[in-house]
Image (cartoon, grey):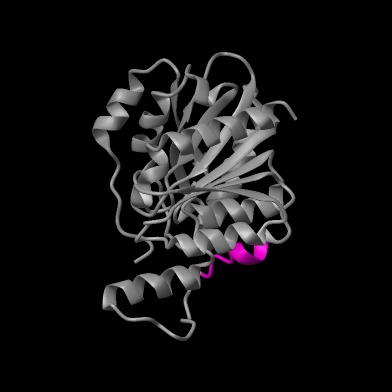
Amino acid sequence: FLYPPVRANAKAEERLRALPNAEQMTIPGENGEQYNGWFIKNGTEKAGLILYFGGNGEESASRAESMAQLTGKEMLTGFHFMCLDYPGTGHSTGQRDEESIYRMARAAWDQAAAREDVNPEKIVLAGWSLGTGTAVRLTDEKHPAGLILFAPYYNGGELVRSNIGELLQTSIPIPLPIRNPYRSDHYARNIQTPVLVVAARDDRLVPYAQSQRLAGQFPAARLVSLETGGHGAMWQDQAALTAVYQFLQGLQNR
């Protein structure tokens, strides 16, 4: 349910290799894994970085290609972009679960913070759907400049329960024992980092109510509610794009 098989997008990779500002990356893991991904430069200067963790059906080349189209435009002013494939996704090796993905996230942070073209004081973590759990947990540990969450769930148990209930067309009244708890609600309470949450009211995959509840767990978070567009609304909705731009520029000025 959480980790469907995802192959690398060969056509997106080919197009990225033709771009002068796209860099394919391979990062070693602590248990011998190899994590594949992409770094998109937004100019030649040392800059901040958006370190992104994707949804359960995403792979890095497709997302990197779409973000490459935004470089040089107002929205990403002052920020590079980086994303990796989860273990067992695309070209990355290993098995997927909450802990293996978190080890990948920590390796990605360490690699990003050590780069000469990245300002480690301006790293922003971002996540969509499944990736929000990893982004929240890493924020609690690393204290980045900012955190952006697209369609975040309250925690892994609530996410699984709501989706099984939707599938069976009935409510699940009791908590379910799961192997990937993703306790975003727990980590959120400790986070002092500026947080932007974007969620669509008609999201059928991650219920809006879960995003709203999670936003309330942070000491200070801005919730941007989208009226239509479903689970992927934040990638096209102008209100969402404007909110992200304003959030990033606010971090630049801190």
Magenta span of residues: 181-187
Q: Residue at x 47, y 39 (%)?
A: 240
Question: Image quadrant for the N terminus?
Answer: bottom left
Q: Let me know if residue 227 appears in the view.
A: yes
Observer-nearest of 101 and 133: 133
Q: Residue at x 34, y 45 (%)?
A: 90
Q: Residue at x 72, y 26 (%)?
A: 253
Is 185 within the magenta?
A: yes
Is 58 within the magenta?
A: no
Above or below, 74 against 173 in this view is above
Q: Let me know if residue 89 appears in the view.
A: no
Q: Residue furthest bottom?
A: 174
Q: Residue at x 74, y 50 (%)?
A: 192
Instruction: Provide residue 156's location: percent of width, then percent of height.
Output: 49, 68
Observer-nearest of 225 and 38: 225
Q: Quadrant of residue 137?
A: bottom right
Above or below, 170 against 128 in this view is below
Above or below, 65 against 211 in this view is above
